[in-house]
Amino acid sequence: MVDTLIVGGGTAGCVLAARLSEDPNHSVRLVEAGPVSIDAAQLLDATRMPIGPESTVVWRYPVDLAASVVGNIVRGRVIGGSGAINGGYFVRATAADFTAWSKELDGAASWSFDAVLPAYRRLERDHDYGDRPGHGTTGPIPVRRTADPTPLSREFASACAALGLASIPDLNALPGAAPAEGYGPVPCNVEHGRRVDTGTAYLAPALARPNLTVTGAMVVTRIRFDGTRAVGVDYLHEGRAGTLAADHIVLCAGAIESAALLLRSGIGDPRQLRALDIPVLHPAPVGAWFSDHPEIGIEYRSAAALASGAGIPLEYVLELDDVEIRPYAVSFTPYIHRLGVALMRPRSEGVLRLRSADPVDAPLIDFRYLSAATDRIRLREAVTIALEVLHGIPILRAPESIPEPTDAWLHANLATSQHLSGTCRMGGADDERAVVDERCRVHGTTGLSVVDLSVVPVPLSRGPKATTVMIAERVSEYLT
Ligand SMILES: Cc1cc2nc3c(=O)[nH]c(=O)nc-3n(C[C@H](O)[C@H](O)[C@H](O)COP(=O)(O)OP(=O)(O)OC[C@H]3O[C@@H](n4cnc5c(N)ncnc54)[C@H](O)[C@@H]3O)c2cc1C
């Protein structure tokens, strides 16, 4: 029996496996649904995301984005998880996010900005600002901002400056060391044109340790309990079913699959579980409120030369409080470019529940985007600002005007940032919205934790990858 069994070798799982196995007396087993041995060249190329219809390294989910708006989302199904297939944007959450997070913990300081800063520093090797306060120079993840932006990104920055917006050279600067709002180059986990995920940065150097075992193509289907103590998992591996025992089980399967695993194992809304003939182990609001960043896409025509030499999908962003404006440097359709307008702290909350008890059936995922009137109002304002920036780029053929960005227009241009979080929220035992405690242990059970983006109890004002790595770094201290 191993000391710790980690389910999911994604962004968080690879960090945990590497950190926990640093202690030679602690045995760790990591199981991953996707391949461990992969075509690295295809995956690591930071200029493309291997998520198209031909991709064999993603989970696919049909979803409801809003009333009458359906969509499809993906997640990485490979060592490195979603971080192995993503855009490479690697930005810390804001100090205000951690103030909000601490409020969810009745003011406890365990997830304040000061408490998490050492983990953010430990994980990074910032090539541009490593010597500045609050940064790190020796961590596993390389962080760089583009040194040679495309003409499109440069024009975007000039248009922001012309509007009087502040420049933020380092979006990961300490609070107070940079303007809170403005435009700047995106810190990326990219080195020599390669996306450096946690599989490469954390797990690969640890693979030779005798106390670490990694198995790919193994899908965990359910957690086994003795009373309320988690004692093992059921899995499917190359067509065969089996069981693994462990002293401690940590779910790192991502915000969708960690939640689905808890639900399938009897931790969830009792009424919904009974309707699916799943015996109830512990009532909990798993999947009841999740968050993600809705994105409105504005398409415009551009000269091909503007995007020439695009290295990474997103080189610059404009941060305006709860809005992030993203001038994608890569063109998804010839001569057509996309400006993403994302709401980073939406009020609308989504719902995830099981379709059936069968692990083969993907869960039902309903984002309920735009259901809060405040979100629609804020997005309309944000689209107007985004158009103002676009019109400041003279060589573009920006849309002359969007016919008044009405609710119908927002719905027609709605997409998601694919940052789903908060299906197993952190909070105290008496918090009716909480699934895990401050140390990510599942309430009502022993020997079971969730350590991935599922646990974040508030919307994050920035993309979540850097924070997911930080969470795993942080919780690894508690699990040894
Ligand atoms: C297309 C895309 C682009 C993105 N771009 C960015 C970006 O540029 N910047 C940013 O900050 N964020 C981005 N994100 C979001 C970010 O990558 C994720 O939120 C983050 O990586 C989540 O980490 P995680 O550890 O929670 O889950 P994941 O990294 O998804 O890891 C979960 C792992 O668990 C495995 N697994 C799941 N179920 C099981 C099971 N039952 N048994 C065994 N293994 C299982 C999966 O195969 C996967 O490897 C993007 C996401 C997507 C999908």
Image (spheres, grey):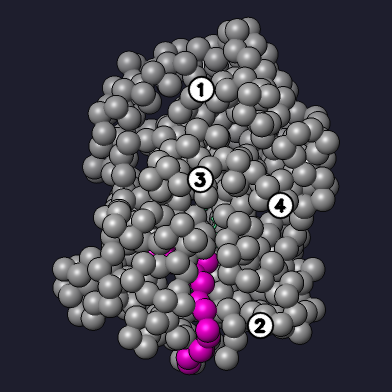
Residue 403, percent across and down?
A: 34, 16
| Mark 2 or mark 1, earlier in chain | 2
Q: Quick one: label 2, few (<14), some, or many (20+) residues within 10 Å?
A: many
User: Which residue is identified by label 1?
Assistant: 320
Type of residue at label 3?
Ala
Q: Is mark 3 within 8 Å of ligand 1?
A: no
| Mark 3 or mark 2, earlier in chain | 2
Of residues 440 and 291, the one nearer the viewer is 440
Q: Could you tell me how many numbered marks the image carries? A: 4
Question: What residue do we see at 66% from left, 82% from top?
Answer: 27
Residue 268, percent across and down?
A: 28, 67
* 21 in magenta: no
What's the distance in space between the residues labelled 1 and 3, CA to CA? 27 Å
Q: Secondary structure at mark 1?
A: strand
- Tag 4 and tag 1, C-beta contact below 8 Å: no
Q: Quick one: label 3, few (<14), some, or many (20+) residues within 10 Å?
A: some
User: Which residue is identified by label 3?
Assistant: 109
User: Which residue is identified by label 4?
Assistant: 123
- 70 left or right, relative to 77: left
Which stretch appears magenta? 242-260
What's the distance in space between the residues labelled 3 and 2, CA to CA? 31 Å
Type of residue at label 1?
Leu
In the image, residue 471 sits, relative to residue 297, either above or below, namely below
| Of the two numbered discs 2 and 1 in the rendering, the one whose residue sits closer to the viewer | 2
User: Which residue is identified by label 2?
Assistant: 27
Of residues 245 and 350, the one nearer the viewer is 245
